[in-house]
Amino acid sequence: TTARITIDRDFRVGDVPRRIFGSFVEHMGRCVYSGIYEPGHPQADERGFRRDVLELVKEMGPTIVRYPGGNFVSGYNWEDGVGPVEQRPTRIDGAWHTIETNAFGLHEFVDWAREADVEVMEAINLGTRGVDAARALVEYANHPGGTAWSDMRRKNGAEEPFDIKLWCLGNELDGPWQIGHKTPDEYGRLAQEAGKAMKLVDPSIELVAVGSSNTGMPTFGSWEHAVLNHAYDEVDYISLHAYYQEHDGDAKSFLATAVDMDYFIESVISTADAVGAQRKTKKRINLSFDEWNVWYQRGLDTDDQPHNVEKSWQTHPRLIEDEYNVTDAVVVGTFLNSLLRHGDRVTVANQAQLVNVIAPIRSEEGGPAWRQSIFWPFARMSQLAHGSILRTAVESDKIDTAKYGDADAVDVSATWDEEAGTVAFFLANRGLDERCDVSVKLGGFTASGISRAEVLSVPEGGDRFTSNTQDAQPVGLTPLDGVSVDGSALTLQLPALSWAVVVVD
Ligand code: AHR
């Protein structure tokens, strides 16, 4: 196949919102316990943070990490996770049918986030709790001192405020599975009042209202409209969540699922702006795509699925530890492209999750940590997408898909780092069997060379299902040969089923 891409230095979408390279740590399965935190592991430091996992996190480069859930947060009392560890209560976590020891809580997460050099994005419980617990947590975390809650934080070892800027007003409260599931009006009013009380404690914080859990929710569209009708003045963002997987061997549709992500994003922008127009306000609500990934949602009776009765009431069972292959990595690359292309409005995004639970990084208890295939597009895009997002005009051969009709064979996003004098392209070839010849017109740029050209594709002797395991990691980046640039013309060949990064000087 062939594709022709045009960019121009004058066609900018906006600045790269660095918070779109976010991730997510939930108290679920082995994300916290034996993921980022495992006292007694040979690589653990004195606080129990796994150094091997931390190194991989730093290499992957998330900028912000959402915590502590997820479905977990809708039944969580944040006070259980602070104070002397030996005095913290052990509780039932109804969301995942596990036992929560509370050995890890807010202080530990803030310390870990500092080590990992990431911003904290804190979710509050609006499932079983409300306005009072929400404002108490903001006071505990962000007030300097001299009040009961802030002095408790200081007594618990943190003299300086945590200064958490970004807060989620609950999680997936549109979903019947959620503890404390609400109607749009119930939730909209609660988000409004909790948000108002939180901002009275600290006016510098930013708030994310819960949007739809996916585009298939019966209330998708009407939920956002009703919630923002109540809480427009109090909140700054509306959330989106989406998980995708390959169904019935239909790889073509799976590879084109970013089309649904584009549709989801554009629909939520329209809904939010419609509410804004009705209110005759210039204020714009931005989007926080704070859970997204590939997730193979198998039957609930499968061994590592939540609510497997055999596994109930363990402390950190294996839950949804998906093993990702080459196809998944290419799809994840297209999701990141979709987010980046909409970076003028999607200004926060979090891949779910960071370690072990549907995660780019895996670790074994007492054992090694390693990179899954999906680690690579995230790592390179977080590393290289700086400066301005450029509009990409694409004329591509099409792939006929059962679910999304004709989809471009090539999916792309581009950024211009004016300071470094480089333009970065992030490209996916959705073609399962055919390589794609790509030509790019660099409007307004005179390129002098290529400083990086790497590709992730099917490794020697493998196929599209090849994945990384603790014993071998065959899926990774290799040099992309045959890239050439001459003034304003760039040409390259993408192997069948591949994700690539090309940086032009
Ligand atoms: O990331 C796994 C779960 O998916 C989260 O807890 C929940 O918010 C979503 O349904």
Image (cartoon, rainbow, N blue to C red):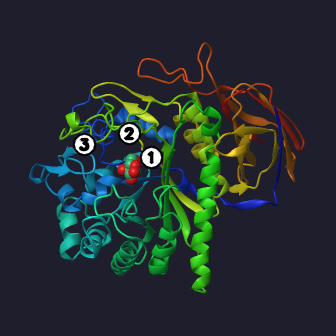
Q: Residue at x 37, y 48 (%)?
A: 25
Q: Secondary structure at mark 3?
A: loop
Q: Secondary structure at mark 2?
A: loop
Tell me if the residue at label 2 has its CB under 8 Å from ligand 1.
yes
The quarter of the picture where residue 98 lies is top left
Residue that label 1 marks: 352
Q: Secondary structure at mark 1?
A: strand
Amino acid type shown at disc 2: Val
Q: Residue at x 29, y 53 (%)?
A: 72
Residue 129 spot, x, y in % from top left: 25, 68
Residue that label 3 marks: 47
Residue 337 spot, x, y in % from top left: 64, 47
Residue 463 spot, x, y in % from top left: 60, 19
| Closer mark to the observer between disc 2 and disc 3 | 2
Precedes in sequence: disc 2 or disc 1: 1
| Closer mark to the observer between disc 3 and disc 1 | 1
Gap in angstroms between the C-alphas marked 3 and 1:
25 Å
Residue that label 2 marks: 357
Residue lying farthest left?
87
